[in-house]
Image (spheres, coloured by chain):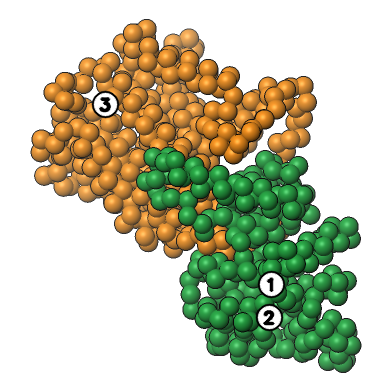
Chain colours: A orange, B green
Amino acid sequence: MRFAYDTSYAAARRRLRYPAGRIAYAVLLAALLAGPYVLPKFFVGEAAALFIGCIMSLGLMVLTGFTGQVSLGHAAFAAIGAYAHVNLLGLGIPLPISLAASGAIAGAIGLLIGLPAIRVSGLYLAMVTLAFSLIVEQVAGRWKDITGGYGGIAVPDPELFGLTLGGLVPFYYLCLAILLGLLLALDNLLRGHIGRAFVGIRDSEAASHALGIWVAGYKVLAFVISAFVTGIGGGLLAHQVQYVTPEGFSLNLSMELTLMVVIGGLGSLRGAILGAILISLLPTAISRVKLILPASLAAQFGLETFVFGLVLALFVLFEPAGLNGRWVKLRTLLQTFPLYRRATFVRGKTYAKSERYR
Amino acid sequence: MKALEVDDLTLRFRGLVAVNALSFDVAEGEIFAIIGPNGAGKTSVFNVITRIFPPSAGRIRAFGADITAISRHHVVRHGIARTFQNIELFEGASVLDNLLLGRHRFNHGGVLAQIAGLPRVGRAEDSSRAAVEDIIDRLDLSPFRNAPVAGLPYGVRKVVELGRALATQPRLLLLDEPASGLNPEETRDLAFWISDIRAELGITVVMVEHDMSLVSAVADRVLCLSMGQRLAIGTASEVQGDAAVIAAYLGT
């Protein structure tokens, strides 16, 4: 059993309130830093890809998890980030500036999409974003000067202050550093009044207006931030795949991002990370499991798609709050042991919403 | 100065007239109740004041300022806060976060300041927290401080919503059926809080309410609406004795 004794409001809003949490995160950070020296080469590359997945998932989480705006076309922002980054690098712009600028370009496009999108929500917004990503894919295929068309475009090795980061290990640290930076920035933002306003818009627009939240403005802001973060993820993804083609940013990637935030648990940054880890590792895990499966099953076409669908269906049915929800329950069990009651997390009746002014 | 002046207000949805040439005003520091049969246009009056619907005609002034054509999210800047008939809380957030959202209109620093986590952002956050803790104290919400709203009983939700409106530091509080769904004990608490809010915080209260025991206990004046029109205005006993009001409620 653990009690929260805070002696000041500042203590209550500390990121890590308990020594156990501080130790756990310190160990995690040490493990991440030591990773490349311990892990086999293959896993170092996988981990870098995983970090990039986490970045893009964080981007979508801001939009879908916090403001409740569904986007089924987030790969488009990654594509914009990737192509912008490649072209800016080609102009001789140094990596950090180019990466930030690619994020900004994706954010600017996010603003353009966000402006009309504030008029629609739910399914209709999903359709708008879906259409947008199809358009971006087509444009990427045709605009040969910038994108190299369907043939693709080669990505120069990442360089920082004259040092090449093209190797697996330096690239691992680059991705890790950017992930941690973005995670901290988003956490700061979402724990404050802007994050609360996002959640407010998601849960009740009528009340948000009445409290002085500029709903349209915050919806667009969420789009911009989300596109910015996803765009940076796209820029890193370009380095990781080393050769950018429109197919790399197809609906498949959008769907994976959506799966990450839903399975991770909407409305939490931890969920975005956990979901990205699960979804990114699933294909590798499946290919490993395939080796020990009977040949008739392992040779089945579409096994991966089936497992993805199954995982999503099971989560929606049994744990709508996602991996993060499971995590919170486990943590509560440990913190309140032996007083934990299952009923703590049973959702109360949802009261009449018939007269909501949506 | 009047807290609220409603002048010749009309709200029309195509052929349906929800509010019809309604005029009334509320003095500063008054507790003013709006009663009327179902569909009389009581909530519509609130919705026009808070700009959910634009009025078809008429003017609304709050503390002397014309608020007939301002944006929805600017209403709170004129010191007006409201609660909703069907409780519009932020289900996914804790009670504390719901109340902190009431402090949204106060400066907490811009996007970049928030991202950087500047010390002044933390100080603003702490002062909001302190203000919210006062409200938690006043409304006896401390057992629920960190509970998610989604699991709270109905009566507590009503109080949280009242607290959230108070967190905006309003001068005029619009309460839409504050006692609906409350048991007699909770209703008594509410009557106590409403008169307290007026006496200690100096907030003008306008409420739509069906519970006449609450209305007669706290309201200085009562306005009775029917079919969007004013039937009677006066003290609770005057309105209750009015022939037109009795006819509207009981039929002729």
Q: Amino acid at mark 3?
A: Gln
Is residue A6 positioned above or below B226 on the image? above
Q: In the image, what residue occupies the spot 72% across and 25% down? A: A336
Q: Amino acid at mark 2?
A: Ala
Q: Are marks 3 and 1 on the same chain?
A: no
Image mark 1: chain:
B
Query: Which residue lies under the disc numbered 1?
Result: B204
State the separation of the CA atoms marked 3 and 2. 68 Å
Q: Position of residue B42 (x, y in %)?
A: 70, 77
Is residue A116 positioned above or below A24 on the image? below
Query: Which residue lies under the disc numbered 3?
Result: A240
Q: Amino acid at mark 1?
A: Thr
Which label sits in the foreground, 3 or 2? 2
Which label sits in the foreground, 3 or 1? 1
Q: Are marks 3 and 2 on the same chain?
A: no
Image mark 2: chain:
B
Query: Which residue lies under the disc numbered 2?
Result: B27
Element type at mark 3 = helix
Question: Residue A66 vs residue A73: left or right?
Answer: right
Residue A322 seen in this snapshot = no
Mark 1 vs 2: CB contact within 8 A = yes
Is residue A269 positioned above or below A80 on the image? above
**Sequence order check, earlier mark of 1 and 2:** 2
Q: Position of residue A3 (x, y in %)?
A: 70, 27
